[in-house]
Image: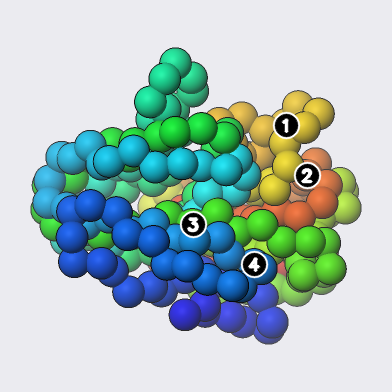
Amino acid sequence: MLLTGGGIVLGTTLGTVPATAMGQDDSDDDEESDSIEFTGDGVTVTEEFEIDGGPTLIDGVHEGESTFEVRAVPSENGQDYSLLSHIGPFDGSTGTFVEEGTYVLYVDADGPWELTVQQPHVSEDDAENPPFSITSSGTDWIGPILFDGDTVVKAMYEAESYFRVDVVPQETENDDFVWNGRELVFDAIGPFGGVTAVHTEGVGYVTVSAVDEWTLEIE
């Protein structure tokens, strides 16, 4: 199911397929592509799967106590993408823009894990228009949002830990501010309050990496 707040998607909570191989969920919802699900234990390289090109969102659970890192690695020469990096138990959602191609997931973990990968693609009419505010906690993604090329993002975080905010655009053509599939908005350690404008124009998603409660205002 989709978790929503104020009419905007906050993340995903999906069931898992109890198998090490991938499974697909055929859906007629225009806002979501088919989801692909993986489960495993410890360090694993998954089977190959196809990426259409665009925002690639990952919903993950990790029961280990150490590194939990997930990378999308192309089967042929090309750029690999960091999808998730965390230490300890994890239950959250994040993502990045991934170019079209055939990929495997490289999972570095020290315990059982579950991953669901999906590629939403929506029209501007289906995206949320600012202004709005969101209060949540932990690692999560927010969207779809319609950015105008000068959208302002305000953030507040009070914990003594890392806090990072990125924008994942639906399209990356002629975007000089996107690196490794994201436009960096904030990157801090410890209590933080800030405001900035983002350059993304059109449909996009916000990803937040954190371990405690945070508030975003998008205007």
C-alpha distance separating marks 2 and 3: 21 Å
Mark 2 or mark 1, earlier in chain: 1
Badge 3 or badge 4: first in the primary sequence: 4
Picture disc at residue 200: 2
Q: Earlier in the sequence, mark 4 or mark 2?
A: 4
Helix, strand or loop at mark 1? loop
The mark closer to the camera, 1 or 3, is 3
Q: Are marks 2 and 1 in contact (CB under 8 Å)?
A: yes
Q: Residue at x 82, y 62 (%)?
A: 124
> For this view, does 191 lie left or right of residue 43?
right
Helix, strand or loop at disc 2? loop
Look at mark 3 in the image and give the residue it sits on. Answer: 118
Asked whether residue 185 is in view, the answer is: no
Q: Which residue is found at the position 62% from the left and 44% from the top?
A: 54
Q: Position of residue 51 (x, y in %)?
A: 51, 42
Q: Which mark is residue 68?
A: none
Q: Earlier in the sequence, mark 1 or mark 3?
A: 3
Q: Amino acid at mark 1?
A: Phe
Q: CA distance from mark 4 to mark 2?
A: 20 Å
Alpha-carbon neighbours of circle 1 within 10 Å: few (<14), some, or many (≥20)? few
- Kindly report the distance in space between the C-alpha atoms of the residues bearing marks 1 and 4: 25 Å
Seen in the picture, residue 182 relative to 2 is either above or below; the reply is above
- Residue pointed to by mark 4: 31
Secondary element type, mark 3: strand
Q: Position of residue 36 (x, y in %)?
A: 39, 57
Q: Position of residue 97 (x, y in %)?
A: 58, 41
Judged by depth in the image, the label closer to the viewer, 2 or 3, is 3
